[in-house]
Image (cartoon, helix red, strand yellow):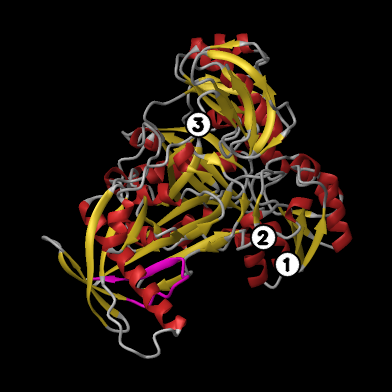
Amino acid sequence: MFKKILIANRGEIACRVIKTARKMGIATVAVYSEADARALHVEMADEKVAIGPPAAAQSYLMIEKIVAACKQTGAEAVHPGYGFLSERSAFPKALSEAGITFIGPNAAAIDAMGDKIESKKAAAAAGVSTVPGHMGIIDTEDEAVRIAEGIGFPVMIKASAGGGGKGMRIAHSAVDVRDGYARAKSEAKSSFGDDRVFIEKFIVNPRHVEIQVLGDKHGNVIHLGERECSIQRRNQKVVEEAPSPLLDSKTRKLMGEQAVALAKAVKYDNAGTVEFVAGQDRSFFFLEMNTRLQVEHPVTELVTGVDLVEQMIRVAAGEKLILRQADVKLNGWAIESRIYAEDPYRNFLPSTGRLVKYRPPKEQMKDGVTLRNDTGVFEGGEISIWYDPMIAKLCTHAPTRAEAIAAMAQGLDSFYIDGIQHNVPLVSAIMGNPRWREGALSTGFIAEEFPDGFKGNPVTPELADRLTTIACVIDHVENRRKRKISGQMSGRPVNFSKKRRVRLGKHWYDVEVVHETERLIQILHPGERGERAIVSQWTPGTPVWHGFIDGEEISVQVRRIPNGYCLSHRGVTVNAHVYTLREAELVKLMPEKVAPDTSKKLLCPMPGLVVAIHVDEGTEVEAGDALAIVEAMKMENILRAEHDGVVKKINAKPGDSLSVDAVIMEFV
C-alpha cells in the first residue's frame, strides 16, 4: 500500500480524498494555486506545494508541475479527483514515465471512454444502446447546422472532452446551433484545453440515470447500482439520489449489465460511471462514460456502504476487488443536494466573495438517518471567480425516500451561509415540491417548475403563522436580554407591552406574548389561529433558530435587518419586521422607497471577466441582441439588450474584471 499520495485537485473533493487517506494511514500532499493558499484542503493535508497562478491553465492543469510536486515530496501516487486532469490520458502517461501511480483507470481506457465521440463508437461496438447523432469532429458552424438539421431538432452540442455541464448547449433551431456551437467550443477550450464538439439527438422529457462501475487490474468489474441525476440546471446537476425512483429491478439489472460489459470491453480498471439518458418508459441510451470519480458518488457510498475512494486507492495499488456482484446490496435511500455559490433569484448568476458566515448542519447518524456534508470551504474563506461555484454537498440517508427527503429539508433549513448568494432556497423549494416527492422527474424539472425563474416559494397561511410566531419570539428574547444587559431598571418591576405587530412581506399580523418561562413562550395570534406553545433554547446572535412549535420541530435561518429579521425556511425568504403598536402606526405613514431607474444601463450581473464586447458606441441595438460576454466560474454568460436603443457609452473592454452591478455600457 502507498505511504504517501498527492491530490491533484482542490475544494471539497480534495478534502474528501484526504479523509479516506487519513483513515487508511496514508500521508497526503496538497497542491494549490495562489488563489487557494488558504484553502481548506491545504490546511488538511500533511504537506503542501504551490503550483502557480490562479488560472487553472497555469496551475492545476499543468502536468509537469504536478509531477514535480510528486518528486519534491516523495508522493508515490496521485488521485486526480474530478475535473482538471482527471480524464486526460496524458496525465497517467506522464506519471507512469516518472514512476508514479495514477489512482484512476489506465490511459487506454481513458482514451477509449474519456473522449465522448470515441466512447459512443466503443459503446455501439459493445452492444450498448446509443443515442442517434454525429460522432465525427465538427469544424465549422455551417457544418454544425447541416448536421443538426439532418438529425432533427432539438439537438445537443457537447464538448468531446467535457463534463460537468461545461461546453454543452441545447439547440432548437439553426440560429441556436450557430450561437451554441461557438459558445460550446469556447467553454470547452477554456475548461478542458480541447475545443472539439459533437452533436447528438436531444431526447425530449428525458431522465438522467447513471451506473457506478468498479474494476480492478485483474479483470474483475462490478457495478454498484444507479444514481438518478435528473434535477439539473443548464446541464449542471443540482440534486442526485440513489437508487432511482424510475428503475425497477429488471431495468436496473439490464442497465448494470450493459455498463459492466462496456467497462470490460475497454479493460476498465478503477472507479467510473456509465451515464444513460432514460425515457419515462424506462428505455435508455448510452450518453457517455466518465472515467473518474463522480461528484455525486456519496449517495452510492451511503446506499452500498462502500468507500469508493478507498477502493480506488486499493485498486491502484494492485489489490483485487474483494466485492463480488452478489455482495452489492442497495440499502435505503440517499439524496445529495449541491450547494452552489450562485443567486437563484437572479437567474442563477455566480456569486463570489467572502464567506462571512458558514454554518452547515452537524454531521450525524441518529435514529436510522445519516446526515453528511462534503465541503471544501470554511467560515472566513473566499469564493473566487477562478473555479466552479461548489460550496458543499449535503447528503442524507434514511430507510425510505420520504424519510431521506424530510431529513434533507430539515438539514437545508439549518444550513446558514452569509456573505455571498447561494442556492439553498432553491434546493429547499425542490424538497417540498409535490412532483419531486412523487419521483416524476425529468432533466427539464427546474425549467418546467420555475418557468419564470426562481422567485421563492409562496408564503402560505400556515407558514405565515409559523414565521410571524418565530419573529415575535426572537424579538421578545432579544428585548429580554437587552433589558438585563442595560442595568438601568435597578431591579424595579417594569411593565413592558408584549403586544407586537409583525409585517411579513406586505401583510400585517398582530401577535402577543401571553406567558413565558426560561424555555417556553406562549404566543397568541388573534382570530382563528389561537395560542402557540414555543420551546427553544435560541440565543441572540445564533444564525439558525431551532425549536418546536406546538411540538413540531422547525429550523429557520435568521439574518438581522433594521427593525426585524430576514427569515429563510423551506424555499421561502421573507423579511419580518417587528414593531410595537405605536411604531407600526408610524411606519405605515412612511413613503415607500423607489428603486433607481437602470433601464438605460447594462449592468454586470455578477463578478466576472469581460470576454467580449459585441457593439460600439453609436450602435443601434434591438431587444435580444448580444451586447457582451462575461465569464465567471468557468461559464460564459451572454448579456443581451432588454430594449431597442442606441449605445451611448461603453465603460468596459475585454479583459476587464468587473464587480456586480458595474456599468458596462449606457444607452441613449
Q: Nearer the viewer, mark 3 or mark 1?
A: 1
The quarter in which the C terminus is drawn is: top right
* Residue 26 x %, y %: 72, 69
Distance CA(mark 2)–CA(mark 1): 8 Å
Q: How many marks can you see?
A: 3
Q: Which is more N-terminal, label 1 or label 3? A: 1
Q: Which residue is mark 1?
A: 1
**For mark 3, does the 10 Å Cα neighbourhood hold few (<14), some (14 to 19), or many (20 or more) residues?**
few
Q: Which residue is mark 3?
A: 127
Magenta range is 536-549
- The answer to whether residue 619 is magenta is no
Q: Report whether residue 509 is seen.
A: yes
Marking on residue 424: none
- The answer to whether residue 548 is magenta is yes
**Mark 2 in CB contact with mark 1 (< 8 angstroms):** yes
* Residue 117 x %, y %: 61, 27
Q: Quadrant of residue 474?
A: bottom left
At horizontal 37% and vertical 53% (from top left) the residue drawn is: 575
Please determine whether, in this image, residue 491 is positioned above or below residue 374. Answer: below
**In-front residue for pair 263/147:** 147
Marking on residue 313: 2
